[in-house]
Image (tube, grey):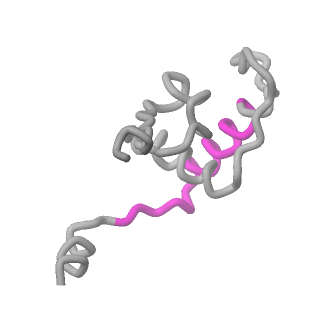
Amino acid sequence: MHIENLIKRLFTVKINTKKIIDKYGDIDAYSQGKLKNNPLGTSARNMGKNDLWIAATASVYDLTLVTTDKDFQHLNGVFLDVIYVDLEQFK
């Protein structure tokens, strides 16, 4: 019952939009160090396809991305704000 109430409070966003698709490409190229006007400044990173969709969507909708993995850290302050939560602190 609690889960049903939570689900009713969630909202969905369309990701099949030109803005998100373009941002997906920008973030992928940036992560690979292929943007001359916006260099990565470190070695290239291979992001998973789902992570790219998540980052692009959060970036376009100006959302803060809260995550428990460090795969998004290189995007923090560049495309979106990222908050990393270290699960070890809760053990």
Magenta span: chief secondary structure? helix
Q: Is residue 62 left or right of residue 45?
A: left
Q: Is residue 15 left or right of residue 43?
A: left
Q: Position of residue 37 (x, y in %)?
A: 73, 16
Identity of the residue drawn at 55% across and 57% down? 17
Q: Residue 70's quadrant in the figure?
A: top right
Q: Is residue 79 left or right of residue 25?
A: left
Relative vertical location of residue 40 with respect to residue 7 in this rendering, above or below:
above
Q: Residue 84's quadrant in the figure?
A: top left
Relative vertical location of residue 18 with respect to residue 4 in this rendering, above or below:
above
- Count the marks: 0
Relative vertical location of residue 36 with respect to residue 62 in this rendering, above or below:
above
Q: Which residues are magenta?
A: 12-30
Q: Is residue 85 magenta?
A: no
Q: Is residue 26 magenta?
A: yes
Q: Position of residue 40 (x, y in %)?
A: 72, 20
- Quadrant into which the N terminus falls: bottom left
